[in-house]
Image (tube, grey):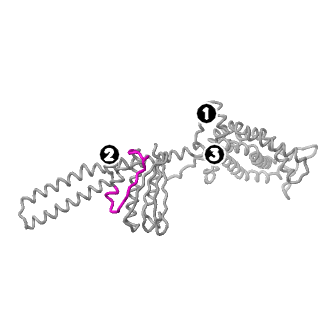
């Protein structure tokens, strides 16, 4: 199977086929289109950079006029802070479009303002605007140095390549001599090794160009790509869809068990009872039918409990508070249920299912591990959060690492945007607290 082709420059540089791919040309095009952007940014920030550099020189003891210079530096900084976010917007828009040259992966879209006034207000209130300003400062200060270094390396490489064409010429009345360390070329034939050296440096220059373009793109993606909330929202929606699909599948299994297996088992029990009427007491066949009838009835009770555990009818019909009280009555523990007055009878289905699932699993953990006969369930609502607490006075020391199901509970709660908190010191008590958004 052929290897997957890289989709952006930073990944392509590590490929052995980089030099014979399209990516060096993309990197070159990205660098060439960046030059005017970097030049304009450097020109606009010249007052700030010049005054700031001079202030630094003064602070290091160069003997310049200190108070005036520091005042100018403060004024330049204030001006940049006051108008820089507005100035950075067009540069950020251009860089977002240029990013597709070497990194076509999508960025989080920028929200559009309803009016000019709201746009200006957002430029000062939004953290993304200040990241755009930071990117502009980097364009006007660091980028010129880096791009200038690459330009100098390109100039040296190009000079080496065309050196046989340069040495026959004269400069200021004298012949041109190319010197590199102990080597010197006065004639075209002597300059051929310099040409070979320049050609050998072309792959190095291609990698340097790629690294510069990739670094520029990575910086732009980090500072201009938003906070990643779109991706987080999509992950949250995906997890919610998985929970909804799981609940739907669980309800389907419950219907199949209730409408299919449970009814057939009831019919089997009745048939065994009718067959028993035709047999005399004390016969081996009658004893066998009695045992089969007892097993069938026990199995019916087990199946009924299983169906109830999969999808409790009380939760579907009466809501979460009633379902928790029913859960407490069926628990082998002595469970007290406290429901705060502000708690409503009904909540969104995924919230009710998650809350019930957490309470049921937490009580199961208490019965298995806590070495206690009592527990408490508390249900409350604080603003838009539904809070479920399960507490016991057992041995404590509950640890998700030991595989007590707490990690699964936390994952289930996180899937609907909630969180699970655990307090279980050695010796008890153990408190499992779940907070679920309940207004969506």
Callout 2 secondary element? helix
Mark 3 nearby-residue class (10 Å; few <14, some 14–19, many ≥20):
some
| Residue 193 located left or right of residue 440 | right
Mark 1 vs mark 3: in front: 1
* Image spot of residue 39 (x, y percent): 76, 40
* Image spot of residue 324 (x, y percent): 36, 53
Q: Which residues are magenta?
A: 327-346
The Cα–Cα distance between marks 3 and 2, rounded to whole angstroms, is 50 Å
Q: Earlier in the sequence, mark 1 or mark 3?
A: 1
Viewer-nearest residue: 377 or 277: 377
Mark 2 vs mark 1: in front: 2
150 above or below 282?
above
Disc 2 vs disc 1: Cβ atoms closer than 8 Å?
no
34 above or below 379?
above
Q: For the point 17% across and 55% down, which residue is it?
A: 268
Q: Earlier in the sequence, mark 2 or mark 1?
A: 1
Mark 2 nearby-residue class (10 Å; few <14, some 14–19, many ≥20):
few
Instruction: Specify the label residue 317 is tagged with.
Output: 2
The Cα–Cα distance between marks 1 and 3, rounded to whole angstroms, is 22 Å
Is residue 333 found inside the magenta-colored segment of the image?
yes
Callout 3 secondary element? helix
* Image spot of residue 207 (x, y percent): 68, 51
Is residue 112 found inside the magenta-colored segment of the image?
no
- Residue matched to label 1: 113
Viewer-nearest residue: 190 or 401: 401
Q: For the point 16% across and 62% down, which residue is it?
A: 292
| Residue 143 located left or right of residue 310 | right
- Residue matched to label 3: 221
Callout 1 secondary element? loop
């Amino acid at each position: 199977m052929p290897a997957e082709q890289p989709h952006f420059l930073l990944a392509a540089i590590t490929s052995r086929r980089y030099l014979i791919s399209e990516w060096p040309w993309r990197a070159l095009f990205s660098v060439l289109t960046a030059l005017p952007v970097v030049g304009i940014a450097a020109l606009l920030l010249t007052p700030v950079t010049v005054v700031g550099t001079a202030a630094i020189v003064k602070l290091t003891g160069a003997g310049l006029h200190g108070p005036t210079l520091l005042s100018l530096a403060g004024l330049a900084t204030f001006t940049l802070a006051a108008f820089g976010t507005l100035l950075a917007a067009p540069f950020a828009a251009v860089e977002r479009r240029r990013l597709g040259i070497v990194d076509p992966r999508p960025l989080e879209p920028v929200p559009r303002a309803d009016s000019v006034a709201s746009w200006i207000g957002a430029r000062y209130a939004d953290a993304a605007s200040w990241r755009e300003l930071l990117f502009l400062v980097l364009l006007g200060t660091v980028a010129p140095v880096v791009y200038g270094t690459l330009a100098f390396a390109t100039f040296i490489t190009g000079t080496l390549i065309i050196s046989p064409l340069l040495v026959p010429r004269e400069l200021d009345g004298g012949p041109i001599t190319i010197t590199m360390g102990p080597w010197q070329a006065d004639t075209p034939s002597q300059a051929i090794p310099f040409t070979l050296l320049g050609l050998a440096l072309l792959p190095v220059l291609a990698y340097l160009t790629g690294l510069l373009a990739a670094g520029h793109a990575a910086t732009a993606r980090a500072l201009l790509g938003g906070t990643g909330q779109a991706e987080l929202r999509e992950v949250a929606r995906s997890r919610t869809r998985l929970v909804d699909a799981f609940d739907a599948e669980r309800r389907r299994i419950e219907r199949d068990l209730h409408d299919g297996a449970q009814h057939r088992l009831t019919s089997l029990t009745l048939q065994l009872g009718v067959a028993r009427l035709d047999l005399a007491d004390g016969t081996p066949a009658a004893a066998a039918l009695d045992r089969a009838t007892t097993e069938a009835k026990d199995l019916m009770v087990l199946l009924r409990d299983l169906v109830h555990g999969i999808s409790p009818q009380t939760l579907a019909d009466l809501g979460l508070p009633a379902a928790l009280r029913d859960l407490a009555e069926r628990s082998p523990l002595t469970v007290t249920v406290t429901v705060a007055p502000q708690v409503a009878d009904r909540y969104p289905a995924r919230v009710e299912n998650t809350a019930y699932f957490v309470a049921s699993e937490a009580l199961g953990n208490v019965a298995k591990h806590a070495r206690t006969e009592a527990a408490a369930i508390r249900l409350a609502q604080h603003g838009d959060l539904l809070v479920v607490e399960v507490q016991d006075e057992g041995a404590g020391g509950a640890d998700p690492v030991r595989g007590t199901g707490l990690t699964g509970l936390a994952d289930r709660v996180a899937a609907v945007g909630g969180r699970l908190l655990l307090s279980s010191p050695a010796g008890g008590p153990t408190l499992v607290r779940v907070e679920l958004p309940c207004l969506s």
